[in-house]
Amino acid sequence: MSKKKIAILAGDGIGPEVTKEAVKCLNAVADSFGHQFNYQEALIGAAAIDETGDPFPAATEKICKEADAILFGAIGDPKYDNDPSAKVRPEQGLLRMRKNLGLFANVRPVKSYDKLLHISPLKEANIKGTDFVVFRELTGGIYFGEPRGRSENGETAFDSCVYSKKEINQISRKAFEAAQLRNKKLTLVDKANVLATSRLWRETVKDIAQDYPDVALDFMFVDNAAMKIIQNPKHFDVVLTENMFGDIITDEASVIAGSLGMLPSASLGTSSSLFEPIHGSYPEAAGQNIANPIGAILSAAMLLNYAFDMNEEAEAIENAVFNALEEELGTPDIVAESKAKTTTEVGDRIAELIK
Amino acid sequence: MSKKKIAILAGDGIGPEVTKEAVKCLNAVADSFGHQFNYQEALIGAAAIDETGDPFPAATEKICKEADAILFGAIGDPKYDNDPSAKVRPEQGLLRMRKNLGLFANVRPVKSYDKLLHISPLKEANIKGTDFVVFRELTGGIYFGEPRGRSENGETAFDSCVYSKKEINQISRKAFEAAQLRNKKLTLVDKANVLATSRLWRETVKDIAQDYPDVALDFMFVDNAAMKIIQNPKHFDVVLTENMFGDIITDEASVIAGSLGMLPSASLGTSSSLFEPIHGSYPEAAGQNIANPIGAILSAAMLLNYAFDMNEEAEAIENAVFNALEEELGTPDIVAESKAKTTTEVGDRIAELIK
Ligand SMILES: CC(C)[C@H](C(=O)O)[C@@H](O)C(=O)O
Ligand SMILES: CC(C)[C@H](C(=O)O)[C@@H](O)C(=O)O
């Protein structure tokens, strides 16, 4: 029996709805395994801007730092996207959180589910059995590099992509370690034929690889990888890449699982860890009880696994999700309209299956 | 009857093989329509490094500038990719050529072919009827931005993404004009929730859109676009995007056509224009007479269309390719091994069909 503090950052759009179902599943785990999870809610994103003017308020940061793990929903509101005059933006909260909590390693597993092969836009034979994981660097690169902004006359804008060996090293070791526990293959995705940063990645990763002689390392240009992920997803075991490339290829890879709503992620640092579905705030669906909670629920499973070392408990959630899919239970993104269930119903059933 | 000068830059790997077939088709057009095409060959890429030490020698630049159009094969040699000590790299030649010739607009059409639906990794119903075109900015962004390189102690590397309103303006107008002649939809792909350059793109494109009131404009984040291109490619008509994002999503989109070997492209400037298949040098296939020449042949069709305003002639090539596919003629990437033809045979047959 363990006692743990979990910070709950539900965020914007469908964030609160899916997070609620993930908490339901954590409670089912707590009941079944005799743990005690204490939740502390905190504001982030547009919701936080509306209440405090800041997308990642100091109070939220404090709660995150005091927690044993963070469960996060989603961030973003279209009212900020097309407003160039908006000085404060929800995404700044997300980025500042990642940076301030030092969440440098974003782990995104990509799996196909036999019961969902038919809803994928990809041919079934092509994706059946896909099982890889992307290690995306999360606190560096063009997301954070300085200088960034506008020239004085407003005619020119610039962003900077910056990486140090140290940054590359810390995420790469995590990726190699993961590869050792999997199929011992690591693919570095970069654009070393054009970018100086990519050449530093390639050089550094090659050096590190000598410490992991049991892992086979290969290199792939990001344009080629974007194609290969669709053409032959079973080629991959562990994919290691920088921040922006990781953003693009993991969203792309979600088509393999059939729905963006299925994919969980972990963001790991040295003293904090955060877990979130990879989908965004999906504002069009907010409040309708139709959002797929499985990405959030599987993120809760990753939380148990990575933050609390509760492997059996994590597996209980994963099995419950698997069994729910076998029952053809799901929201409208993965089940035919006529048989689809609501967000709440899916969460209820998965929680029930956990017990 | 027209007289035209075409620079031939065959380049590396399979470049020379596929370019030869494209020239064969241009000759068939010249014969049938009574034109005179004069070809001037010039060195580029690894081939140029081997002979002159420079991947884009001055002599080549001169030939390009004097030509009415440039037909280009491919560039790149693996011996440079994993050698961080290589000071001169084939890709530098390609990038310098794009820059020096001012080829700012890279036009990449993406189409599905009914006869090739079965070889695509995507479900056929999903891609049948796909027909969109990507306008990729080609002489700006992170490919060229300064500063770029290493810190003095070698521990840090950096690249700069820079865009001016002027650069955004010139490619955007081309994209809007293309949309007016197509289905009047334009999607700007960016990462405006993170990048300052993307916000400048969004702002500038919004302004320009007022001059094209008949074109419906929408915005899509690049991560979402990478997913949507697979999930619902028929959503798109004209896609407008910056250099790096365009590189990634066009390679990705090639899965729709079934093979990277099928896709042509045009790179347009104010005084030069260049035409090339989007595939790379594919060194593993070089010299084997198995590379798909259709991307190169369709690039020759784009050349006739864009550079010489020979619409009927371009159509003659496109129809010949279509008819060849109807005959199930093709290299091993698009036709079952047992029935596959060689590069030369495919080129011969398409040239014959043109006449
Ligand atoms: C919302 C956005 C800033 C974010 C990112 O690009 O990292 C999102 O797309 C993600 O992948 O978590
Ligand atoms: C070879 C490489 C530099 C080039 C690019 O990234 O532009 C290629 O991928 C392309 O798309 O033409």
Image: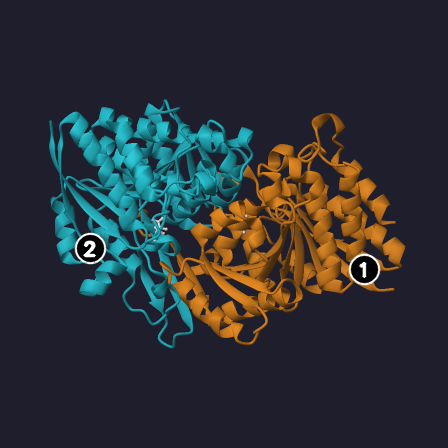
Chain colours: A cyan, B orange
Residue at the location (84% across, 49% down)?
B354
Residue with the most extreme front position: A338
Mark 2 vs mark 1: tell me if same chain.
Answer: no
The amino acid type of the residue labelled 2 equals Leu
Q: Position of residue A218 (x, y in %)?
A: 45, 32
Q: Which mark is residue B353?
A: none
**Residue B223 or A349: which is nearer the viewer?**
A349
Q: Which mark is residue A43?
A: 2
Q: Is residue B104 left or right of residue B264?
A: left
Residue at the location (20% across, 51% down)?
A100
> The residue marked by circle 2 belongs to what chain?
A
Local SS, label 1: helix
Q: Which residue is mark 1?
A: B312
Label 2 packing within 10 angstroms: few (<14), some (14-19), many (20+) = many
Q: Position of residue B16 (x, y in %)?
A: 70, 43
Would you say residue A179 is visible in this rendering?
Answer: yes
Q: Is residue B12 left or right of residue A109?
A: right
Q: Is residue B307 above or below residue A64?
A: below
Quadrant location of the N terminus of chain B?
bottom right
Q: Is residue A55 left or right of residue B161?
A: left
Local SS, label 2: loop
**Residue B148 or A100: which is nearer the viewer?**
A100
Residue at the location (14% across, 57% down)?
A58
Would you say residue A186 is visible in this rendering?
Answer: no
Q: Is residue A186 above or below residue B58?
A: above
Q: Nearer the viewer, mark 2 or mark 1?
A: 2
**Label 1 residue near ligand 2, CB within 8 Å:** no
How many numbered marks does the figure carry? 2
> The residue marked by circle 1 belongs to what chain?
B
